[in-house]
Amino acid sequence: MSRTRAALLVALAAAGLAAGGCGNPSFDRRIDQGGRGVGEACTRASDCRSGLCLSRVCAASIPAGACSPSGRRPAIALGAVAGPAERPADVPDPPCALPVNTAVIGPVQERGTHVPGDEVSFDVPPGTTGFTLYLQEVDGTAPEAVDWPGAGPAANAPFPQLVLDAGGARFYDDAASPPIVDGSRDYSQWLLFYAGVIPAAGAVTIPNTTTALDRVRSDGQLAPGAWRFTLNDLAAACTTTAGCTGGSTAGRYDVKVVTRAGPLLSTGTLDLEIYLVSSDPAHPEYTAANAAADPSTNATAAQFRRLVDGLQSLFARAGVCLGTVTFHDVPDWARTELSTPSIDDSGPCSELARLFRLAVPRNAVHLFLVDELTTSASGSGGTVVGLDGSIPGPSGVPGGVNSGAAVVLADLGAEAAPGACSPASPFSVAACGTDVVSYIAAHEAGHWLGLYHTTEATGTALDPLADTPGCPCGTCRPASSPLPCGSALLSAPQCAGGSGCGGGDNLMFWQIDPSVARGTLTPQQGEVVRLNPAVR
Ligand SMILES: [Zn+2]
């Protein structure tokens, strides 16, 4: 588990502009590996010439799903106002005691309330291809942060210390160290990557690494039977760590487990809930009614239609069909108080958490469009234009402190040249601000669905997927850089292609630079997304 808040920022660089490409996903494998042909038995992908083993048989491609994202125009709906009409009284903070949220998807296993150190068992039925552990603080029992030696204030994140599969084999050990490849930590060889960075809540979704994807594909399921995990939080770990202050073993957490059945398919369907949280006096027209109006007669509706179509074109690369995109207003009090939320506080009573708790009780990705994300931190690397409540998001358990992603909508409708955002103009983050908002929103939704930055900003941590291009600091930091690895930031142009320095074009790069951003997604990124419980 990462001890620092990372992996969450998208920065928008002020840079030259270029058009983005567009294409359909291909999930056919390209790498010749083992010697076995299609139809022959296998145990892992490396046995097969196709590089793909499905349920112990070498295959040419992943079976087709029920929908086709190519050229799709998602349905847009007008939803109810989200959140209480009257401003609720402030929750005393500390302790910021909040109710536990209920699951709106099934099957859910309610595992009750547990404390750090408890071993919690749950059932993985035959045919299960993924599961999520949901951890929610109960009654404000846990401190928000501890002072971790060498790291300073650190959010008291709950996390699984140890996960054992049905055979008793170690699936995840938080105390282990990953292999170092070219100066970067490489988690693709692990079965689970988890980085809890906020207090009070966490969602741990499996599979999210190359090795776990291979296991799920090749076995056709996760090992069925009784799995176990040991609950921990940073405050409890602090009590046994020399030099750490602020520790506590008082935290209590509600544990839910949602399992996902069914095979991996080439496409899947995702619903979006989009909340308009603008109080910009220049844009009173940013209402859900306008967003859902007829785009042929309403200019605001036309831009929101373009926003949704742009999201679909980006998600098509992950094999995702957007089902229904529902726009919501929030009550006036929320629009006034939360349209420029501070991102400096990650606590359960922070402005971001209050915003995310407005989410309606539906299984979807919940995107909150705000005017600005404010911070007292210096703007190294660009302006923060998007932030997730957590990675991954709590799919199917909405209304919690991490139940959303915030996206800045300030660029909506801005045109580099007249007509760049008109219906006839192609998708371009270089030319059309609405497409920039689509790009940010797709990136944040990617985080919600389990994707990390292909390479973190300092180039010292890679995502847990082997087919995403890396940009490791040891190779890619310019020799002229005055800063050492760990301090230097690797920009998108520095990670834009050759010599083992890639990923700047990927949707999940940490920085959007229109000169290189293409919204690329790899086959494994698509698989992680489609196995998330929010995708059906
Ligand atoms: Zn990001």
Image (cartoon, helix red, strand yellow):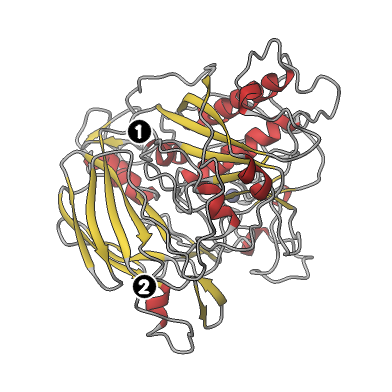
Q: Which of 114 and 206 lies nearest the eye of the viewer? A: 114
Q: Secondary structure at mark 1?
A: loop
Residue 496 sits above or below residue 285 on the image: below
Q: Which residue is mark 2?
A: 175
Measuring 86% from the left and 25% from the top, which residue is drawn there?
417
Q: Residues within 10 Å of mark 1 (few under 14, many from 20)?
A: many
As drawn, is 175 to the left or to the right of 287?
Answer: left
Evaluate if marks 1 and 2 touch, with contact meaning CB atoms under 8 Å apart: no
Residue 407 visible in the shown view: no
- Find residue 320 and report its horizontal and vertical position in percent: 46, 29
Q: Position of residue 284 (x, y in %)?
A: 74, 31
Give the image quarter of residue 519.
Answer: top right
- In the foreground, 418 or 287: 287
Q: Residue furthest bottom?
A: 242
Alpha carbons under labels 1 and 2: distance apart: 35 Å
Q: Label 1 belongs to which residue? A: 50
Query: Where does the N terminus fall, quadrant-wise?
Result: bottom left
Q: Is residue 463 left or right of residue 406?
A: left
> Looking at the image, which is closer to me, 510 or 434?
434
Tell me where residue 186 appears, x and y as whole percent.
47, 60
Identity, as a three-letter code, of the amino acid under mark 2: Ala
* Earlier-in-chain disc, 1 versus 2: 1
Q: Which image quarter: residue 125?
A: top left
In this view of the protein, can residue 53 be seen by the observer?
yes
In this picture, is 410 found above or below 182?
above
- Amino acid on which disc 1 is placed: Ser
